[in-house]
Image (tube, helix red, strand yellow):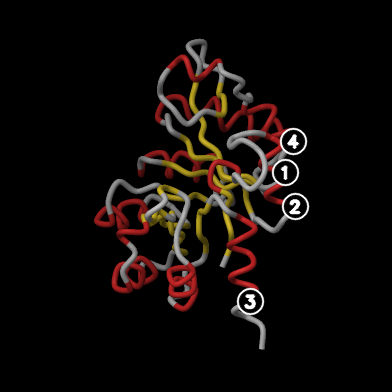
Amino acid sequence: MKIIAHRCGTDRYPGLTVQAALYSLEIGADYAEMDVRYTRDLQPVICHDADPRALYRGTHSLDEMLGSVPSIVLHIKEGGDKMPILLGLIEEHGCGDRVVLGVTAASDAAQVKRFDPDIPVLAFMPSPESAAEFAAQGADILRLWENWATGDAVRQAQALGKEVWIMARGRRGCGYTSKRNLLLWRRLGVGGVLVNDVRKTKIILAEETQP
């Protein structure tokens, strides 16, 4: 089961930074996940919040992240007619083989696949019921929230022929879950989990595979 460092991970450094992303990958994450928004002049930057003030508080440009971090999941918060800007940067950096593009609209999945059918697309679906729509438009991975991730929901998503990733969201908030859930998801054949604590997750999964 892949470990995806949610918001680049928070094991040591502030989230959504180059330092956090590189550290998470160093300690065992398969990908560093980060959010992409646009400034007023349509420059793509790494930022979770829609608040325009947040776009200027020490954010990294997408260009900087693509040039610094080798394995990235981009949560594209604003797609549609802005997608060509992001896809142009992907092409410029020649990094289509080391990114996963996370989309919130099925039409954006189709845009990515028209651009390059080999780039993996992660569906940040608004509901489990939209899984078939995203799958039909080319999404390769379906994201389920933790509270959606019943055994039946996971199997139904897998029946579409797609990999399933789960966004952890437990008592401590988004990015956190329990050992019990991690082990259950692995038994269900879940392909990846988005978590904040990369090191802790890595230890739990490693311990449970030892003879």
Label 3, label 4: how many angstroms apart (C-alpha)?
31 Å
Query: Disc 1 marks which amino acid?
Result: Leu
Quadrant assignment, res 28: bottom right
Label 2, label 1: how many angstroms apart (C-alpha)?
6 Å
Q: Is residue 201 above or below residue 123?
A: below
Image quarter hosting the C terminus: bottom right
Secondary structure at badge 2 equals helix
Residue labelled with disc 3:
207
Residue drawn at 63 percent across, 64 percent down: 202
Circle nearer the N terminus (3, 4): 4
Residue 26 disc label: 2
Residue labelled with disc 1:
22
- Where residue 129 appears, as percent x and y from the top left, is 24, 56
Q: Do labels 4 and 1 touch, CB within 8 Å?
A: yes
Query: Which numbered disc, 4 or 2, marks the residue closer to the eye?
Result: 2
- Where residue 89 appears, as percent x and y from the top left, is 63, 29
Circle nearer the N terminus (4, 1): 1
The residue nearer to you, when weighing 128 against 171, is: 171
Query: Disc 4 marks which amino acid?
Result: Ser
